[in-house]
Image: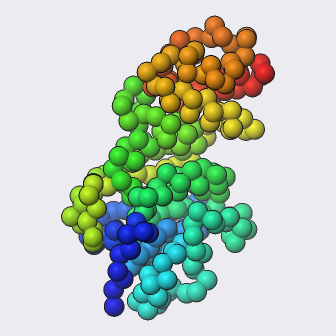
Amino acid sequence: MSVKAKKHLGQHFLTDENIARKIVEGLSFEDYKNIMEVGPGMGVLTKYLLEKDQTIYLAEIDTESIEYLKKNYSKVTENTFVGDFLKQDFNFINGEQIAIIGNFPYNISSQILFKIVDYYGQVPEMVGMFQKEVAQRTAAVPRTKEYGILSVLIQAYYDVTYLFTVHENVFNPPPKVKSGVIRLTRNPKEGLAGNEILFKQIVKAGFNQRRKKLSNSLKILNIPEALKTHEFLDKRAEELSILDFIGFANLWKQNQ
């Protein structure tokens, strides 16, 4: 028995066992007892996760994949399946810490990253495979062409490490692009509590016109009078660090 890859679910099944092991080894397995795998498919990562001491949960919406996993992996039980990851509220683990891992569907990769940020307090770590371009943008640093909205909004909460690139020929069916594996590790940055909405507005407005100075691109947000001569506004978004954005968002809030 095998599972037919479904285009509407963005399924590309990894077939290389060495890469599967490397992805699982990307997790630290420290300071948490729960792990959720997103989109396990036919279990190429699952088999290695089940060897660990942590409790494994599988977020899968493909019923054919669920039946395959139940049949082929004896440790997989009904209560390990939590359905659509994007709709999961994590209440089922009663506030405990949970790491996330997966060969993520390309069509919802950004949504998965932002879902993890939404549960920042419960998710200390993530290792995932994304379309290479998304992985690069998530891990990008200032003054590079990849650095943008995704880079800043994720790195405000997590340190991002680009682990390795995966060729398209190790999937069935092969995607049209290469993939990249990244690790997110929750970082100690603070100062955004209660200010997340404004922070996101500033980041998105700044990068939507990334070639312009922020004094121009942020006009639509009605910059507080006291900040209109701030040096932050003389820069372009791609020149500034995550801490620059956090600091200016906090100043903005204080001067509203």
Q: Quadrant of the N terminus?
A: bottom left
Residue 210 falls left or right of residue 243? left
Answer with left or right where residue 12 lies relative to residue 66: left
The number of discs equals 0
Q: Residue at x 42, y 68 (%)?
A: 8
Q: Residue furthest left?
A: 169
Residue 105: in sight, yes or no? yes
Where does residue 141 sit, x and y in percent of width and height? 42, 32
- Can the viewer see residue 28 in this picture? no
Please tell me which residue is depicted at 54% across the width and 72% down the height of the picture.
59
Query: If the image is split into quadrants, where does the C terminus sit?
Result: top right
In this rendered view, identify the residue nearer to me: 45 or 253.
Answer: 253
- Image vertical order of residue 168 relative to residue 137, above or below: below
In which quarter of the view is residue 189 placed?
A: top right
Please state the horizontal and vertical placement of residue 66, each as a whole percent of the image. 48, 83
Image position, residue 103 (x, y; %) = 40, 64
Residue depicted at 47% across the width and 18% down the height:
212
With respect to residue 162, does 236 lie above or below? above
